[in-house]
Image (tube, rainbow, N blue to C red):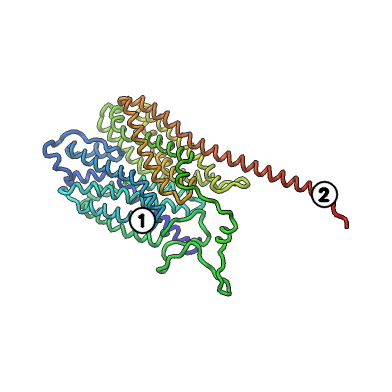
């Protein structure tokens, strides 16, 4: 794509990155917003009978840790439990609705999915803007709507990588990293609140930003999906009030319709039937990928959920040290945007290497994924071992490994599903994978609770579980090796047939008339 097409493509990329960074994953910065909501008196009526009660209960996300240690406001367990419930419902709603969101995206296309996402997200921000301490319960539907809308924004942006064929995976992983780093949005709102800008003003501004989402939907994204590989004459968005189609029709001098190069290529190539959703779901690729994601996601969640008591144990309960380490951990989480593209660069570099004769682009991408999947598991093993060692300075290295692994984990998951399965099932498979992995994490967490909170034994079990994730790169490697063997055998047979045909021509006597 050249000229205006190139400008539009890069504008689509830049605005998509901004959307993921500033809106999509804002829910996971919830604890910074809790600080503001407490100041405003939300759910304060629940503390009338128990002022200054117990300390806050963990929300299950890293941002919450800094809040609990830096807030000077009196703590009220009833109020904190209510805030925890808001986050728990919103995050679980996002996970449960992953599959319906994927079906919506695959069935109705980008435009419809994004319009629904914009409606949900805007409704959620308006609910927060017009909520008051007397209407604190509005936070329950508001944060849930923002969470679901944010996931749909991410899902619709991941396909932008298809516009950059040589850097497809780098763009995909970069967007996932931006999604992780977008938890900083609520932290910015907290800083603005400290500077005197009201909560209502901030959320009304977020609501007004829906204009950006709408402009991107109509002018910088297609109505359906971005195909891969990208046709030469592909165009998207509105141009002078008209929407161009995927393949434009050309005419000859006599006015007769003429097939484009893309149509000729499609006519000449044999039509291969794509796998059904059920076939994808029951494949070893998908099952092993689900196992790969689930066990490492559990390792991540357990570390985050037990970080505060672990640091309290390692520091002998010194508040200043605990606050220092949790602040360092919270700052590290914002580096996901910097770490995530490295996974994509590794994939794109190895995918771009010289391919063997007869090797398809998908096979080359799968071969590159073996390295990425294995490296992600290795990172998790190192991270798990460091987390299990009761040494306080070592936790700095643990924090670095945790954020790097987190970036590789979610970006690699999206890249794998994008490469290994048909694009028409991406939304469903991506949403279902994240949803099912969350359910599996809950089941495994319930099993680990049988160890009666013995952190050492739990860490050992988690490290052993993580080793099971090597099954996925092994499955992909065996698949690629099988394809290579079949390709080599087919080439040998063709060579033998060609040699036999040549010999038969040489030994056959010529006819004499």
Closest to the observer: 235 or 303? 235
Q: Among all residues in the image, which is located at the extreme left? A: 49
Mark 1, secondary structure of its residue: helix
Residue occupying the point 26% across, 54% down: 123
Which badge, 2 or 1, is on the more N-terminal residue?
A: 1
Q: Is residue 488 positioned above or below 154 on the image?
A: above
Tag 2 residue: 508
Whether residue 303 is visible, yes or no, is no
From the top left corner, tell me how far across and down residue 263 is, in percent.
Answer: 55, 61
Q: Are marks 2 and 1 in contact (CB under 8 Å)?
A: no
Closest to the observer: 258 or 508? 508
Give the quadrant of residue 391. Answer: top left
**Closer to us: mark 2 or mark 1?**
2
Seen in the image, is 509 located left or right of residue 466?
A: right
Whether residue 505 is visible, yes or no, is yes
Tag 1 residue: 114
Give how far apart the Cα atoms at labels 2 and 1 are: 69 Å
Mark 2, secondary structure of its residue: loop
Q: Residue 232, labelled with which disc?
A: none
Seen in the image, is 502 located left or right of residue 285?
A: right
Disc 1: CA contacts within 10 A as few (<14), some (14-19) or many (>=20): many
From the top left corner, tell me how far across and down residue 355 is, in percent.
Answer: 59, 46
Disc 2: CA contacts within 10 A as few (<14), some (14-19) or many (>=20): few
């Amino acid at each position: 794509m050249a000229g205006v097409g190139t400008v539009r493509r890069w504008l689509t990329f830049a605005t998509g990155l901004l959307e993921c960074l500033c809106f999509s994953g804002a829910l996971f910065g919830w604890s910074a917003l809790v600080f503001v909501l407490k100041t405003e008196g939300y759910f304060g009526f629940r503390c009338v009978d128990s002022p200054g009660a117990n300390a806050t209960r963990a929300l299950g996300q890293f941002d919450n840790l800094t809040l609990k240690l830096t807030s000077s406001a009196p703590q009220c367990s009833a109020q904190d439990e209510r805030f925890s419930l808001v986050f728990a419902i919103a995050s679980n709603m996002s996970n449960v609705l992953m599959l319906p969101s994927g079906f919506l995206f695959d069935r109705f296309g980008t435009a419809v999915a994004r319009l629904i996402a914009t409606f949900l997200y805007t409704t959620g921000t308006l609910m927060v803007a017009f909520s008051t301490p007397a209407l604190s319960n509005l936070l329950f539907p508001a944060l849930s709507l923002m969470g679901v809308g944010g996931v749909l924004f991410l899902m619709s942006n991941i396909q932008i990588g298809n516009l950059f064929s040589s850097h497809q995976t780098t763009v995909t992983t970069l967007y996932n990293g931006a999604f992780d780093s977008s938890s900083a949005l609520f932290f910015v709102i907290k800083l603005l609140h400290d500077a005197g800008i009201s909560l209502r003003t901030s959320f009304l501004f977020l609501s007004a930003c829906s204009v950006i989402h709408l402009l991107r939907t109509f002018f910088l994204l297609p109505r359906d999906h971005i195909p891969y590989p990208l046709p030469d004459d592909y165009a998207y968005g509105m141009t002078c009030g008209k929407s161009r189609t995927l393949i434009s029709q050309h005419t000859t001098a006599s006015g007769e319709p003429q097939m484009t190069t893309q149509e000729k290529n499609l006519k000449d190539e044999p039509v291969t039937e794509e796998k059904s959703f059920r076939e994808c779901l029951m494949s070893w690729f998908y099952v092993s990928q689900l196992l790969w994601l689930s066990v490492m996601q559990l390792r991540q969640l357990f570390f985050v959920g037990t970080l505060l008591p672990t640091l309290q144990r390692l520091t002998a309960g010194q508040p200043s040290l605990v606050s220092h380490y949790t602040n360092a951990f919270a700052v590290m989480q914002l580096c996901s945007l910097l770490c995530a593209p490295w996974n994509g660069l590794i994939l794109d570099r190895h995918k771009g290497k010289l391919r063997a004769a007869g090797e398809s682009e998908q096979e080359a991408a799968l071969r590159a994924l073996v390295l990425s999947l294995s490296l992600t598991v290795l990172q998790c093993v190192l991270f798990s071992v460091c987390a299990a060692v009761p040494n306080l300075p070592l936790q700095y290295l643990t924090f670095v490994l945790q954020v790097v692994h987190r970036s590789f984990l979610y970006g690699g998951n999206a890249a794998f599903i994008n490469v290994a399965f048909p694009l028409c099932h991406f939304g469903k498979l991506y949403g279902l994978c994240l949803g099912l992995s969350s359910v599996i994490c809950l089941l495994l967490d319930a099993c680990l609770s049988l160890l009666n909170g013995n952190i050492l034994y739990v860490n050992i079990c988690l490290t052993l579980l993580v080793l099971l994730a090597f099954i996925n790169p092994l499955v992909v490697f065996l698949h690629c090796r099988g394809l290579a063997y079949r390709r080599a055998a087919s080439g040998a047979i063709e060579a033998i047939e060609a040699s036999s045909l040549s010999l038969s021509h040489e030994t056959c006597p010529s006819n004499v008339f």
